[in-house]
Image (cartoon, grey):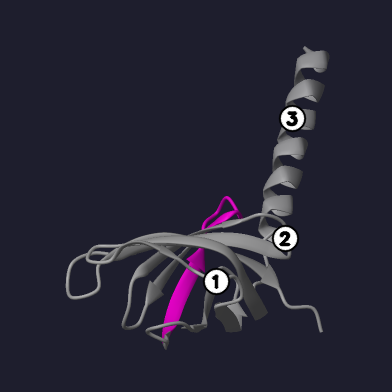
Amino acid sequence: MIKALLTALLLTGLLAVNALAQDTKIPNLVGDWSAGKSDLHHGKQGFINIEPTSAKLTVTDQKGRVFHGVVEWLGKAPGKDTFSGVIDKDNVTFYMAGHTDAVRIGKMEGPDAFTFYFLHAGGPNPRAGYVEYKRVKK
């Protein structure tokens, strides 16, 4: 009986430590990020090759799991979009809602790298693709 009680207490303690550790692992996205490899399919233009470093993303502020910033892209149709985002409880997946353009779903690949997948359905500019980003070191 005492063995069972000690085992239960030990397991409870391990679960509590694990829960606390998850809260401290929220990635810090604040800063500048530079685009790398990417691919895109446009509803009207088909597959489009995008040059690396043709986009940059800046997360300007973050409070816990919630963040916001701006993404800018170059090329034939340059532009930018501000966004609001939230990091999933798994501390790997995040979601960004563009204030004027697209939904982006991201996956952390370490503290200084992530890939986001963007989906823009319907309208004059339907497209889907992904962009790999690396943190710009200062």
Instruction: Give the CA separation, mark 2 to mark 1.
Output: 36 Å
Give the image quarter of residue 101: bottom left
Which mark is on residue 11?
3
Give the image quarter of residue 114: bottom right
Q: What's the residue type where badge 1 is placed?
A: Glu
- Judging depth in this view, the residue of 106 and 21 nearest the camera is 106
Q: Residue furthest top?
A: 1
Instruction: Give the CA separation, mark 3 to mark 2.
Output: 20 Å
Q: What's the residue type where badge 3 is placed?
A: Leu
Residue 92 visible: yes
Is residue 85 one of those drawn in magenta?
Answer: yes
- In which quadrant of the rendered image does the N terminus lie? top right
Reading the image, the residue beneath label 1 is: 51
- Judging depth in this view, the residue of 16 and 43 nearest the camera is 43
Looking at the image, is mark 2 or mark 1 nearer the viewer?
1
Residue 3 horizontal/vertical position (percent): 82, 15
Reading the image, the residue beneath label 2 is: 24
- In which quadrant of the rendered image does the C terminus lie? bottom right
